[in-house]
Amino acid sequence: MPIYVYAPVNKDGSLGESFEWLQGIHDPILTHHPETGVPVKKQLTNFSTPTKGPGLLSNDNLSKKGFTKYVKAGGGSYKKVAGQGPDRIKAPN
């Protein structure tokens, strides 16, 4: 179930401190705080994106997004497989 963000509406029309509310996607939008009864307004927030799937964490995509990826190379060292930076790094002792 999605988590929605709401903010109480103050008497002067400003918004108070927001809160999260877990509800079904087909449930009606809250109009009042479920515990206090104060009027609330639904807030627009960022959405989650998948972290797994074809190409999302590929070495090429990581490089394009500005990340560097290292993999274990043995002997406490790591070799670069994506991005910028030294070709090898050694783990601190």
Image: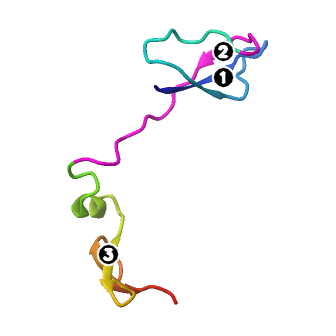
Q: Amino acid at mark 2?
A: Val
Q: Amino acid at mark 1?
A: Ala
Answer with mark 2 or mark 1, whichever residue precedes in sequence: 1
To which quarter of the image does residue 63 belong? bottom left
Residue 31 lies, in percent from the top left, at 62, 9
Q: Tag on residue 18?
A: none
Question: Which structural element holds mark 2?
Answer: strand
Taking the spot 36% from the left edge, 64% from the top edge, the residue there is 67
Q: Tag on residue 71?
A: 3
Figure check: 29 above or below 62 = above
Instruction: Say left or right for 3 vs 56.
Output: right
Taking the spot 79% from the left edge, 12% from the top edge, the residue there is 11
- Local packing at callout 2 (Cα closer than 10 Å; few below 14, some 14-19, many 20+) is many
To which quarter of the image does residue 59 belong? bottom left
Question: Which structural element holds mark 1?
Answer: strand
Q: Is residue 51 magenta?
A: yes
Instruction: Say left or right for 24 vs 10.
Output: left
Taking the spot 43% from the left edge, 34% from the top edge, the residue there is 47
